């Protein structure tokens, strides 16, 4: 087994900030708010009621009950620590491709069968003790059993003494965060932004619609990975949680997640529902539209929090262009941009009227993509001579 991380130095490490606090709250009986998956939510200009969308892949998941045990999964390979050291050049700095709140991620190569070298990403957890073990176990148990084109594939794991590692399929285009916010990254075109949003929405829908529902709880640009065709795949199931059972409307839990993405009602009460993921999805939509981070301490005080800054512009067609990512230099269809901003507004709205993920996906799929436009549409401030020197990435 050699290693194959020559290109890994081209990518920067990420800075995930995981916040935690404990909240006391009492459980209440199940309401309809989290289960109304077939309401008639639609764009204001749409006359047709929504058709509820079911996710396409198999969704039967035996939920992990005991967090001490790895649930048997014949898909997963158990690696020795030495095998993974060999695969990553002993976790050398050149192989480092990412860092999150819980682990360092290295690129490497493992044996993928006779004569086959398989590129992998190896996450070595940095959190020691029970908390680290819990995160690791959640990833093994959820990703080992959930399979969908929009979830990253977990290949295996390693558990030796204090060391906890996870081995995933390698995602050559890194994370959405890299593409949106890294200066030296090529500008992500409008159509690729749409493709990523739809892919990520499909991943979340699959989790929410699974027989044993899963709440992802850490939906953010750094956890959306991109394959060679810019298909979005959710990774990092360290905070995932099984959805409510026994007629309850929510699970009551400690508040953990990432600042700027967590739903206000969850922060206030500790009540976790699938709608919390929908809120985070709305924040990511805003990041995609605006090219700004959910929280950006380098900006002026009133612009630090993306939701607070963008909200006043989202429902007005004439104002939306003011918050759009300037790196797009106007290269996006007006109508689509407004549909996306309207959808983001609904996602970050009050939990009582917030749409479900299947509804969000259905609306996203109605947004016309440039390829399908019947007539040439105008762009906000489009001016081809003002195109920056940065290249745009496009669909094949
Ligand atoms: N399979 C992968 N392929 C390529 N890059 C990855 C892969 N998994 C993670 N990364 C990179 O590492 C970063 C951190 O990974 P993540 O699983 O989110 O770690 P953490 O649990 O510490 O937050 C990601 O944002 C991404 O840039
Ligand atoms: Mg992460």
Image (cartoon, rainbow, N blue to C red):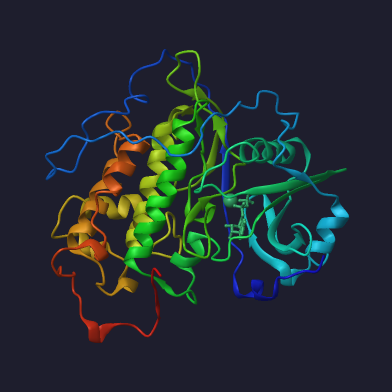
Ligand 1 visible in quadrant:
bottom right
Which residue is depicted at the point 54% across and 47% down?
Answer: 151
Which residue is depicted at the point 40% across and 36% down?
Answer: 264
Q: Judge from the rendering whether residue 333 lies leftward or rightward of residue 149; answer left or right.
A: left
Q: Quadrant of the C terminus?
A: bottom left
Where, by quadrant of the figure, is residue 247 drawn?
A: top left
Q: Position of residue 358 (x, y in %)?
A: 35, 37
Please tell me which residue lies in front, 76 or 301.
76
Q: Is residue 293 visible?
A: yes
Please tell me which residue lies in front, 215 or 2.
2
Where, by quadrant of the figure, is residue 391 drawn?
A: bottom left
Q: Position of residue 157 (x, y in %)?
A: 75, 46
Answer above or below: position of 343 versus 287.
above
Total residue callouts? 0
Answer above or below: position of 193 versus 155.
below
Q: Judge from the rendering whether residue 48 lies leftward or rightward of residue 248; answer left or right.
A: left
Q: Judge from the rendering whether residue 62 lies leftward or rightward of residue 319; answer left or right.
A: right
Q: Judge from the rendering whether residue 170 lies leftward or rightward of residue 43; answer left or right.
A: right
Please tell me which residue lies in front, 298 or 356.
356
Q: Position of residue 377 (x, y in %)?
A: 15, 68
Q: Quadrant of the N terminus?
A: bottom right
Which residue is depicted at the point 62% across and 36% down?
Answer: 145
Q: Position of residue 237 (x, y in %)?
A: 59, 42
Please tell me which residue lies in front, 312 or 290.
290
Q: Is residue 301 visible?
A: no
């Amino acid at each position: 087994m050699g290693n194959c991380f020559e290109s890994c130095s081209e990518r920067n490490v990420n800075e995930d900030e995981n916040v935690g606090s404990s909240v006391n709250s009492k459980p209440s009986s199940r309401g309809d708010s989290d289960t109304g998956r077939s309401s008639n939510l639609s764009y204001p200009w749409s006359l047709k009621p929504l058709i509820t969308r079911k996710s396409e892949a198999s969704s039967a998941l035996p939920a992990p009950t005991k967090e001490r045990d790895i649930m048997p999964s014949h898909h997963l390979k158990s690696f020795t620590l030495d095998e993974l050291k060999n695969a990553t050049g002993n976790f050398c700095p050149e192989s480092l491709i990412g860092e999150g709140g819980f682990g360092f991620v290295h690129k490497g190569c493992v044996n993928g069968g006779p004569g086959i070298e398989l590129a992998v990403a190896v996450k070595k957890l940095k959190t020691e003790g029970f908390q680290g073990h819990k995160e690791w176990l959640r990833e093994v148990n959820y990703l080992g059993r959930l399979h969908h084109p929009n979830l990253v594939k977990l290949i295996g794991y390693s558990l030796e003494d204090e060391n906890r590692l996870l081995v995933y399929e390698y995602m050559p285009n890194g994370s959405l965060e890299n593409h949106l916010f890294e200066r030296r990254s090529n500008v992500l075109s409008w159509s690729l932004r749409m493709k990523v949003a739809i892919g990520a929405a499909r991943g979340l829908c699959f989790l929410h619609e699974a027989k044993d529902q899963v709440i992802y709880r850490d939906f953010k640009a750094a956890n959306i990975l991109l394959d060679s065709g810019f298909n979005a795949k959710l990774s990092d199931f360290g905070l995932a949680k099984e959805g409510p059972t026994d007629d309850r409307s929510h699970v009551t839990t400690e508040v953990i997640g990432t600042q700027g993405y967590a739903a206000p009602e969850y922060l206030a009460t500790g009540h976790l529902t699938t709608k919390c993921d929908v809120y985070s999805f709305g924040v990511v939509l805003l990041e995609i539209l605006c090219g700004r981070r959910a929280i950006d301490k380098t900006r002026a005080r009133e612009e630090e929090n993306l939701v607070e800054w963008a909200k006043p512009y989202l429902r007005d067609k004439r104002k939306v262009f003011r918050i759009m990512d300037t790196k797009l230099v106007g290269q996006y269809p007006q109508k689509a941009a407004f549909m996306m901003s309207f959808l983001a507004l609904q996602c970050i709205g009050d939990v009582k009227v917030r749409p479900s993920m299947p509804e969000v996906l259905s609306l996203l799929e109605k947004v016309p993509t440039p390829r399908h436009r019947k007539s040439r549409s105008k762009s906000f401030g489009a001016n081809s001579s003002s195109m920056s020197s940065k290249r745009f990435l496009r669909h094949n």
